[in-house]
Amino acid sequence: MSLTDADVRRIARLARLRVSDAEVSEVGRQLNGIFGLIEQLQAIDTDGVEPMSHARDVALRLREDVASAPNRREAFQAIAPAVENGLYLVPKVIE
C-alpha cells in the first residue's frame, strides 16, 4: 500500500498535525515504511502460538491479605471537623 500526497495531507488534517508542503513527501515515505512493517507482521503465521502477557514467564508471589496496621478510625474521626454516622462530612464544592 502506497500513500499519495493527498492521503498524507488528509491523515495530517485528521490527526491535527501541521505538515508543510515540503514535509509531505518525507512524512509519506515514513508512513509507507510503517505500513510496510505492519504488512510484514501480518504475514507471519501465528497459528498455534499462545498469547503471552509478558516476554518472560513470570509469576507474582502472592501473600496473605491480612491487615497489618491497627484500626485507628475512631481516633481519626475524633479530630475530624465533621463526622456523621461514621462518615466524614465535607463541604459541597460543585453545585
Image (spheres, rainbow, N blue to C red):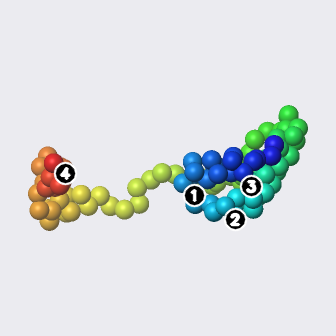
- The residue under the point 72% across, 51% down is 5
The residue at which mark 2 appears reads as 22
Separation of residues labelled 3 and 4 (CA atoms): 48 Å
Q: Which mark is residue 76?
A: none
Q: Residues within 10 Å of mark 1 (few under 14, many from 20)?
A: few
Check whether the beta carbons of the residues at disc 3 and disc 2 lie within 8 A of each other.
no
Left or right: 43, with 27 as reference point: right
Q: Which mark is residue 28?
A: 3
Q: Secondary structure at mark 3?
A: helix
Check whether the beta carbons of the residues at disc 1 and disc 2 lie within 8 A of each other.
no
The residue at which mark 4 appears reads as 94
Pick whichever, 48 or 6, lies toward us: 6
- The residue under the point 70% across, 65% down is 22
Separation of residues labelled 2 and 4 (CA atoms): 50 Å
Q: Residues within 10 Å of mark 3 (few under 14, many from 20)?
A: many
Q: Residues within 10 Å of mark 2 (few under 14, many from 20)?
A: few
Check whether the beta carbons of the residues at disc 3 and disc 4 lie within 8 A of each other.
no
Give amino acid for label 4: Ile
Q: Which mark is residue 17?
A: 1
Left or right: 62, with 45 as reference point: left
Kindly tell me whether residue 89 is visible in this rendering: no
Give the foreground label among 2 and 4: 2
Give the foreground label among 3 and 4: 3
Q: Earlier in the sequence, mark 2 or mark 4?
A: 2
Give amino acid for label 3: Gly
